[in-house]
């Protein structure tokens, strides 16, 4: 395994190909455990399993909601201290050419994110982790990106508890938690991916925070949980949303023509001098936006 070869701290996990293997690994780790697809998007197909009854359903759920086809899933040890005193970070590394044609690495500020359940819910910049933890996030993510090679954006998901950093997942592409870079950096992760993969150099300021003295929070806008099957999007009251959010904040609708239960439909973005205020405002705007989307059958 890559993390072990690089001698990097990681959360314990194992592959399982059949339901019996899921139960055996869960017994070794002890409940609760996390069961998730090998490839997912924003955590879809992921279950936090707390009892035997849920464990029986988790393997099928992970397979059915995976990106791609296959029998293999991941069973991961649950870290209770992560919930009580830790946080989650996405450390983005950009491998790109410098002016002399040499591949170099640039690092975005660590992006902090939260998911109260199994799926992505909100992210913000700047992160609140210690300078030592931030240094370790960059160091570990740099080793991972260097090991993988190539050019472009590498998003490394890490768990931070105090100053200790556990490496968990890698996406060699733009990442959902990095959408906050659209509003908080001089160049967002999409622009960084395009520029670097075209073989163009990046200016040092490209990866710097553009909004100084504020926290920026992106909060997910979801379709209702009670949906059965798929429903058509009839309309989005953008006027009401913009009036509600006021100046300085933003709403980004993904333009999806239909929705199923809990589907991500957009992002609400808010900014404030303290993090709690920014999070509260983004959440408030997200919930208002959710009520401003009209679906077929409503």
Image: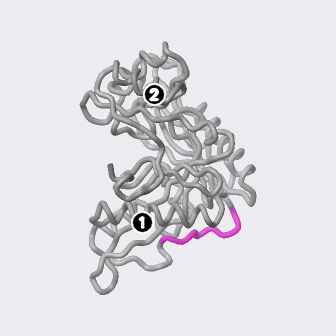
Q: Which residues are magenta?
A: 207-214
Which residue in the protein does label 1 denote? Answer: 142
Q: Is residue 189 left or right of residue 81?
A: left
Kindly identify the residue that appears in the image at 68 percent across and 40 percent down: 84
Q: Residues within 10 Å of mark 1 (few under 14, many from 20)?
A: many
Quadrant of the rendered structure where residue 174 is? bottom left
Q: Is residue 107 left or right of residue 133?
A: left
Residue 240 in sight here: no
Which residue in the protein does label 2 denote? Answer: 28
User: Which of these two is toward me, 220 or 18?
Assistant: 18
Q: Position of residue 285 (x, y in %)?
A: 65, 42
Residue 13 in sight here: yes
User: Which of these two is toward me, 193 or 168?
Assistant: 168
| Residue 267 falls within the magenta-colored stretch | no
Q: Position of residue 293 (x, y in %)?
A: 54, 32
Name the secondary structure under disc 2.
helix
Name the secondary structure under disc 1.
helix
| Residue 213 falls within the magenta-colored stretch | yes
Q: Among all residues in the image, which is located at the extreme front?
A: 28
The numbered mark, 1 or 2, whose residue comes first in the sequence reads 2
Image: 234 above or below 268: above
């Amino acid at each position: 395994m890559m993390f072990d070869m690089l001698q990097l701290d990681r959360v314990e996990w194992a592959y399982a190909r059949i339901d019996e293997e899921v139960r055996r690994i869960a017994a070794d780790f002890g409940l609760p455990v996390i069961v998730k697809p090998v490839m997912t998007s924003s955590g879809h197909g992921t279950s936090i399993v707390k009892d035997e009854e849920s464990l029986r359903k988790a393997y099928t759920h992970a397979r059915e909601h995976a990106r791609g086809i296959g029998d293999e899933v991941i069973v991961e040890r649950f870290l209770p201290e992560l919930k009580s005193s830790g946080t989650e970070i996405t450390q983005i590394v950009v491998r790109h050419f410098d002016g002399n044609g040499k591949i170099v690495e640039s690092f975005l500020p660590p992006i902090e994110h939260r998911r109260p359940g199994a799926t992505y819910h909100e992210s913000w910049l700047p992160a609140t982790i210690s300078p030592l933890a931030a240094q370790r996030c960059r160091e570990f993510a740099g080793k991972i990106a260097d090991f993988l090679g190539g050019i472009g954006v590498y998003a490394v998901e890490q768990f931070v508890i105090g100053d200790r950093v556990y490496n968990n997942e890698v996406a060699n592409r733009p990442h959902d938690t990095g959408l906050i870079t659209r509003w908080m950096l001089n160049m967002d992760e999409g622009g960084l991916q395009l520029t670097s993969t075209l073989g163009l150099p990046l200016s040092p300021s490209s990866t710097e925070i553009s909004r100084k003295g504020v926290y920026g929070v992106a909060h997910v806008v979801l379709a209702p949980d009670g949906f059965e099957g798929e429903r058509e999007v009839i309309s989005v009251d953008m006027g009401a949303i913009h009036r509600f959010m006021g100046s300085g904040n933003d709403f980004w609708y993904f333009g999806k023509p239909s929705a199923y239960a809990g589907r991500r439909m957009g992002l609400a973005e808010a900014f404030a001098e303290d993090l709690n205020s920014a999070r509260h405002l983004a959440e408030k705007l997200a919930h208002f936006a959710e009520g401003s989307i009209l679906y077929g059958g409503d």
